[in-house]
Amino acid sequence: MRIVFCFKNPCAKISLLFFAIALASCNTLKRVEDNELLLTRNTIFADEEKVNDEDIQSLIVQYPNSTLLGYPLRLNLYNLAKQNPDSSFQNWLYKKEKRKERLVKLLSEKQVDRLGESFMVKGLSEWLMNIGEAPSIIDTSDTRRTLERLKAYYNSKGYFNNNTSFVIDTLKRAKRAEINYQITLGKPYIIDSIVDKIAAKVIDSIYQLNKEESLVKEGKQFDLVDFDNERKRLTSIFRNSGIRKFQESSINYAVTRDSTKAGDDQEMDIALNIDNLRTRSDNAITTSEYKIEKFKEINIYTDFILSGEEDQHNVVNYKDYNIYYKDKLRFSPKTLTDAIFFEKDSIYRELDRSRTYRQITNLNVFKYPSIAFSTDSLQTSLLTAKIYLTERPKYSLGMELDVSHSNIQQVGLAFSPSLQARNLFKGAENLSLTGRLNVGSSNDQSITATDNRFFNLLEFGADINLTFPRIWFPFFNTSRLIPNYTLPQTRLSLGTSFQKNIGLDKKTFNSILGYNWSPSDFKRNAVELLNIQFVNNVNTNRFFNVYQNSYQRLDEIANGDDPEDIYDYDNPLEFPELAENFELEDDTIDPQLIIPAGTAGFTQAIISGAVPSSTEDLNEVRSIEERRVRLTENNLIFATNYSFSKNNQNGITDNSFHRFRFKVESAGNLLSALSYVFPFNENNDGDLLVFSVPYSQYIKTEFDYIKYWDLSRSNVLAFRSFFGIAIPYGNSDNIPFVRSYFAGGSNDNRAWNPYSLGPGRTDEINDFNEANLKLALNLEYRFPVAGDIKGALFADAGNIWNVFDSEDDPDKTFSGLDSLSDIALGTGFGIRYDFTYFLIRVDLGFKTYNPAEEISQRWFRDYNFANSVLQIGINYPF
């Protein structure tokens, strides 16, 4: 959706003005009593050095009121509310004699009472208090609690002799104060020696093998975090070495200090104690030595919820696994056992348990997987693993309905039915079939002239996807290279779509053979061995109806509208041979080129030299024609690509992480190799043809990096950088439109609409500006405003250029570092409403630096509301 936002409505201006006056007139100290102080800042000093560490700052109990760009918005919203709206209404009601009596006659007794409870009287005040923020009055009890936290924190870092204090610094402005927390650290304690006392021999032997990697070492400063992490490290080692029941609470440390040492010697002795297993039964607690457990047998129950364990009498033994089922085994044994990482006679490992859960879930044919263990009554070190599985429904239906509006259609309806079939060939293969039907309404005269129905736009298509939970590669075993725990998957897909009265009425066919695997939750690899796409432009005669800017420029040249034009081609006396290419519309002064016959005839006459033309006109007409040919020709793409992504985000609440994505794609090389074996036809330009279509050949690569910084109190700084380049070669001298780059839009440079920025320093010559090199940099500061309302300030920089292709316009091409001066800059602000599961975003972008302008006018020329661009999006842009 593209909307240009401007303040043309005077009511909007007046409302905004009154709102600004109301907020500005708020007294920040309105609810601060004479004997109270409003907290404005907290500062922590450790040995007189200011502490900015966020973890330490989070220990403060009482914070100042939040601000929006330095302004206490939420505090002043709170102050706008009436403290006691009921009494205020009563005072107003009885302020004048007979006011209530008149209201009762006009309304009724009950309606007058309800008036006092109405939103404008009571509800508004409650709403302002809910989204606002009460004044943060300094409370010394909270201050002392902060001191206790700070002391405990620095104790955990080895500063056991630290001293804490605070000073309330009264400011010059009345009723306001800062709090300075001061910590004298003293000398830290150092670990002098470490001894271990381990009850179980098997635990001791495992510990000694892994002792060198300990995080608690002699000579290091005491840090409680190291002890906690070492406890977790040892627990993981023991549980992955056969000690299934190991309890983290069995590990404890004794810290002592030799009193015979000098008084100022800050050295500590550490004793590591690992106790035996503690078991609670009834009211008694017993202890026993830890033992290494091995698997005696592994049982898989495929119909657990349906029948329970005891009713599954049928069993299949496959590679030391017992597979139980009730009536019929609906899964191949290999598929089931490949998802289980426990092995008979092997020791228990916690990692195998996690991988089993992960792989079973990834099959997408079972729900509620559960794993239980039992021990042999005679030999307690022997384990029986029981994996309980519940099959998902084999078939499921779905339907999606969407209503949309865009610059192409006034209103659009989209229907998308889907069918999913699971476990198609007993190997957890999943088939999905999705249909698409989009109908829309357009008032484009070129469409309504031939189709006057309300819904005159149509797009329909279908996709079929088949996934296998393994890498399917003929004549090659990939299990060693890509093991099962990486969740390998093969995907086969076919798709097609057809358009009517949309653009050039494309018919698209695509097919993909791809693989993906994830070694961990933070890394993902994907290979598309074959990505085949065929685009057939059915109605190429509508090019100039669709690309109106190209048509207008061509018509301007034909009409000689530019003062520098020396030829008036629409003059039948001067150019009678071109007269048939023009027609005079009722609402126009100059004749216009007829689409498509007139545009084709005029273009051909100029390029062939049938009529005289200036060098500028010839070059521009040739450029428009080259673009028309490129965008109307059919495309055949045989591509192979590889992508890798990595991130370190721990959950959706983690706001301090980075994400990296790399992709490389090559197209046309397979067909180029086959051309040496089989003779291919050629077109007039010497391009090789497959099915009468020149195939595309290029190399393309992309780098995408995102970084988040958690500043504090839900304030986040987010950064994104993107670089992509696609280089044509061999059978191509340009990149297909579907593989090119564009700039602008709600997820890119928000001061420009989609496709309206670039290439280079050109100014929207074409309707859909695209190129084969892109650079984008985005920086966004996100902050809370009130309740679920969030705010953002952003700066978007970047552009697109042509490089190493058929484009020779210096304004569009990237020629070196000098072209970086064409990087556009957009800045602005946005409001977001957080619905928890998704977020609605409204951003207002301003053109700060526009490379399409003259050099002296590039900065801030269109930096105003009239030329701003309103972008609407779902969720964050990156």
Image: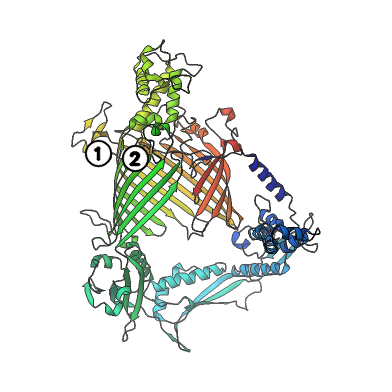
Choose top left, top right, bottom left or bottom right for residue 497. top left
Q: Left or right: where does residue 103 sit relative to residue 425?
A: right
Q: Position of residue 613 (x, y in %)?
A: 41, 15
Q: Residue at x 30, y 33 (%)?
A: 730
Q: Left or right: where does residue 311 sit relative to residue 405?
A: left
For the image shown, how many numbered marks are present on the structure? 2
Q: Mark 1 belongs to which amino acid? A: Leu
Q: Residue at x 25, y 32 (%)?
A: 688
Q: Left or right: where does residue 636 sit relative to residue 779?
A: left
Q: Residue at x 34, y 62 (%)?
A: 362
Q: Is residue 36 above or below residue 466?
A: below
Crowd band around label 2 with a 10 angstrom C-alpha radius: few (<14), some (14–19), many (20+): many
Residue at the front extreme of this rendering: 105
Q: Is residue 144 above or below residue 755?
A: below
Q: Is residue 388 above or below residue 545?
A: below
- Foreground pick, 36 / 719: 36
Query: Nearer the N terminus, badge 2 or badge 1?
Result: 2
Q: Position of residue 296 (x, y in %)?
A: 28, 78
- Foreground pick, 153 / 653: 653
- Foreground pick, 676 / 589: 589
Q: Which residue is mark 2?
A: 499
Residue 616 visible in the current orientation: no
SS type, badge 2: strand
Q: Mark 2 belongs to which amino acid? A: Gln
Q: Which mark is residue 208?
A: none
Q: Position of residue 240 (x, y in %)?
A: 38, 71
- Foreground pick, 453 / 323: 453
Residue at the left extreme of this rendering: 678
Residue 116 visible in the current orientation: yes
Q: Which mark is residue 671?
A: 1
SS type, badge 1: helix
Choose top left, top right, bottom left or bottom right for residue 79. bottom right
